[in-house]
Image (spheres, rainbow, N blue to C red):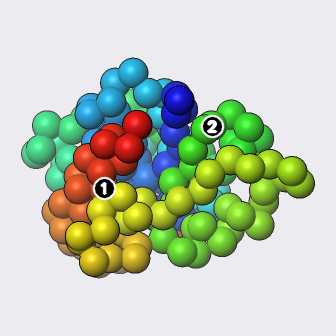
Amino acid sequence: MTSAILFVCLGNICRSPAAEGVFRALAPNVRTDSAGTGGWHVGEPPYGAMQGAAQARGVDLSDLRARQFRTDDFTRFDLIIAMDGQNLRDIEALRPKGNATPLRLFTDYAPDAGMDHVPDPYYTRDFDGTLDLIERAARGLCATL
Ligand code: 4NP
């Protein structure tokens, strides 16, 4: 049984906290967290525009704080979900020898969306488009549990 899921992006202030916030509303019994492969925003709440776009859909991200991905996350979680291929490669490079924790792209759970990554709204500014994709992938992930 998958009881703990970690969502990972680059900064942990846009995509992965949004993914965590959307998913935890759908699956409140699953332990969730999010992290960034980079450490620039450690301790910060999610980016204001991301929080606003999520809040407009009834998703509250205000309790979340950024942290950096750590190697012991491989043993603390049953499933690790990356927002894009670079995140996936950066996480994989930290995998301890012998560890087999599944690591997947979030878009794998929304195959009909035709996307191979979750676009970063910190750069695209399309917070709603990213949330649409996150909602589809979160529903798809939920259906696999
Ligand atoms: P995220 O977006 O990976 O979706 O949290 C980013 C936010 C900030 C930065 C990079 C990505 N940054 O370099 O500051």
Circle 1 sits on which residue? 137
Residue shown at the point (40%, 76%) measured from the top left: 116
Is tag 2's residue or tag 1's residue first in the polypeptide sequence? 2
Q: Which SS class for mark 2? A: loop
Q: Which SS class for mark 1? A: helix
Circle 2 sits on which residue? 77
- In the image, taking residue 84 as reference, residue 92 lies left or right, namely right
Question: How many residues crowd mark 1 within 10 Å: few (<14), some (14–19), many (20+)?
Answer: many
* Amino acid type, residue under disc 2 in the picture: Phe
* Amino acid type, residue under disc 1 in the picture: Ala
Q: Residue 36 appears at what percent x and percent y?
A: 57, 55
Residue shown at the point (68%, 34%) measured from the top left: 76
Residue shown at the point (42%, 60%) measured from the top left: 106
Q: Residue 125 appears at what percent x and percent y?
A: 25, 73
Residue 2 numbered tag: none
Q: Is residue 115 above or below residue 94?
A: below
